Amino acid sequence: MIERDDERAELLDLFTECQRNRGGVAVISGPMGCGKTELLRDFGNRVTADGLLLSAFGARAEQGVPLSLIDQLLHNAASSSEDIVAAATPELAELRACAPGISGLHMMRDLGATLRRLAEHSPVVISVDDAHYADKESLQALLYCVHRLSSSRALAVFSVPTILSQEFQQFHADVLRLPHARHIGLTPLSEPATTRLVAETLDVSAAHPLVSAIYATTGGNPLLIRALVEETRMLAKLTEGELPAQPVAGEKFGRAVASGVRRGEPDVRQVAAGLAVLDADFSLTLLYRLVDMDPVACAQIVQALRSAGLLDGGRFRHPSIRRAVVDGLTPQRRGELYRRAAVLLHEQGTAAPSVARYLLSADGIEAAWALPVLKEAAETALLRDDVEFALGCLGMALRLCDDEAEYAELKVVRARAERRADPSASNRMLPPMAVQADEGGQSRSNLITSLLADSTEEDVVDMLEHIGLLRLPYSFPSPAERVRKAAVVITAASAEERGSARAMIKILTRGTDEGAIAHAEQVLQGSPLTERTVDGLVLALMTLIYADRLDTAQLWCDTFLAQTITRRADAWAASPAAVRAEIALRRGDLTATKRHAGLALSLVSSQRVGIGIGLPLACMIRATTEAGAYREAAELLARPVPPEMYETRFGMHYRSAWGHYRLATDRADAALEEFTRCGESMRKWGIDRPSLVPWRTDAALAHLRLGNRLAARALAVEQLQLGMDSRSRTRGISLRVLALTGEAGKRPALQREAVEILEGTGDRLHLVRALRDLAATSGEREDAAQARILMRRAEKLAADCGIGPVGAAESPPAFVEDAAIDTLSKAEHRVAMPAGAGYSNPQIARRLFITVSTVEQHLTRVYRKLNLCRHELAAWFGVAQGVHSHESQVG
């Protein structure tokens, strides 16, 4: 009876009035489990010493038995030992015996007269729990009596739920309309009251996290609180009294929920079931369509369940509550609701994974749209590493599929998913799978990729011999465990591939590894170019590239390319050409990058595009982007690529190229998303090395464009802490970006070190950027002569390499190479530079934290001093305005 003092006092006041010959009636209402029965029982115990208690309870099973509730009241009265009842026993016995046969009006009069005679001797309290389940005839008799209680020593108290059936609503309204009627509403307990209730059983303080967790789970519903406390107490006994931080919501809790819901009206049970089925997809419109109910009535029931503490918004506040409601449904009803929910969600365009969850819970549906939904959901789940859900979708899709070719494709996909869940599963089903896959080259290729991960060498050989294909793709599958086992996957192809794969794994997982570098060089020196060795040689080349050994990699790559031309082995040339394009890109030679990447792409058949296209395509996109050819880059990005490419290291190069294009075309938000996704994949796969893709500094540049200096700095520092070689190009890149994020006074030292490192590595692309940065810093420090020298060098180097003008995404603009610049004040100089770079006046104002009017005044003086108009500023400052008009180019 915690936090029920006011309600208890009100009932006792009514009884006091009753003793003074002023009868009354009270209705106790409230949500399930909030203590209506307990309050009624407590009141009955308190009045028995001073009056006569006639109690009864409504039962759903007896609603069809006329006068069954009146019979309870008469029986309880007749069995009482009170003198006043004993004196009236003949009348009670006669009434009880004759009640079923007496006409309605006569029975009600006799009952009223009997109650009045009893009240002459002592106050009479009629207590009816769950009155909404009373039979119709008993309700009529009770209503007749309560109308005549006002001048007698009789009091009637009924308990009812918040939501009432239509049949009982009229009785409820008629009772509360009486002048001597009171309504007593109960609500869930407050958090302090919950603490008191918990403390009655558990030795716990108000500050213990368990208390707030219990309140959050139950919403203060006493029925659920007691169930949680009891299960938690039992657990504490098993753990020698130690209380958990979270409550235990087990079988007892589920039974409490189920019993509370079952005691509600049918409509309440329907709505509760609908809410449990919809869960996170709840909306009121969807709910009333699902349970086929009037919207207003449905909303009232939802509100009642909220007031009971069961719901938080439109969802059950704890999974155990939802589970208990779902488990309480018959299998037939459960399947019906899930199927109907799937249809409704599909009709409103909900994403395939959400619809598929309902289809799985419904165990299928006869609908043409279900199969493509399940397939799409499975593909999405595999991309998100939700293998269990994907397998469920694929299993149901196979049951629904009646097309032989599509069925074989689905089995291939399921084999891949089962391999991720259980490495032995796919092997057991290999023979029938292989036969089906042999009928189509693409399916066979997918099957190999699906089944090889995590296999033993013997398994690999057996698979390949069975399928009749001894060539293996040399790319790494996406999950980390597959990457680490790539050497085994490549076993059957050649010793060169095995060794090169192991070397690359070491570089990508550990960073610079001299043993791995030596092994790669050994493979290159000791292996002639043949059909069997070409993939191993390419892996060795990429190992050297990722280890920043560009000189050695370029030497060997040029040698192999020359051999392919001499021997007219065009089929072998695509991969070395792509590798050569990557080398040229890392050296900043955009002309060579485009030449080699173009060769690689020309050798790839449009009908047989594989995951390897990611590398040359990424190189070409980066080269055209860095050259400022945004329309050409956009056309390259429109080329179709295999979806599985994103799950390989080639996909990391491609994502990086996408990000740089978006950054260069003023879409920093999209660029940041691309770089971040790249980093997430690399970390997940265990190959998070900046020598593969320096995604952190790329993301830092996007953050700088967005004004997030601290986030950019954190990424640059994190990249520097990855243990790279002190003279590596990735260190030079990291220092250059770190300088952009720091204080102006600390930039020159970092920028000079970056320039020095990048000069030594031969990375002219990032060297140009570093030189431009240092020139801008020198200009800000009013060292115009040094700025001009650095800028001349940067622009000459950029012209030699085919690098476009500085982009607004990174460095500040360059400086005017003319004595006239000295006539500008520092403030005019700061405004003139971004104006020459193509920024609008409002953009300049935001960039410099001044007003637009101030910008206009400064620019007016700049035009007058330099005798220039606005569009001529770009030529003076060495900055092309095309960077800021890219959208018109791309269209």
Image (cartoon, grey):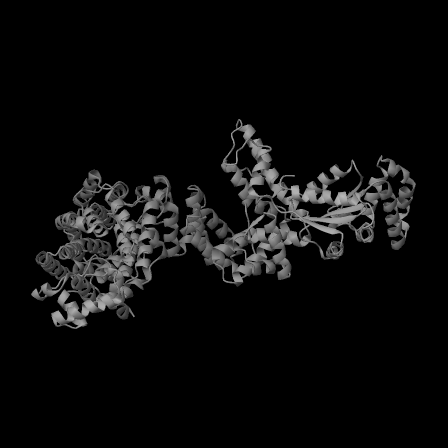
Residue 433 % position (x, y): 44, 49
Give the quadrant of the N terminus: top right
471 over 861 or under it: above or below: above
Residue 25 falls left or right of residue 767 = right
In this orientation, does residue 693 appear?
Answer: no
Give the quadrant of the C terminus: bottom left
Residue 573 falls left or right of residue 646 = left
Q: How many marks?
A: 0
Residue 837 % position (x, y): 20, 65
670 over 189 or under it: above or below: below
In the image, 6 versus 760, the foreground residue is 6
Q: Residue, x 57% and y 32% (percent of image)?
A: 202
Residue 801 % position (x, y): 14, 59
Residue 660 falls left or right of residue 109 = left
Residue 100 % position (x, y): 88, 49
Q: Quadrant of residue 318?
A: top right
Residue 729 falls left or right of residue 792 = right
In this orientation, does residue 594 appear?
Answer: yes
Q: Quadrant of residue 83?
A: top right
817 over 478 or under it: above or below: below
Report the residue that reaches farthest toward the top: 240
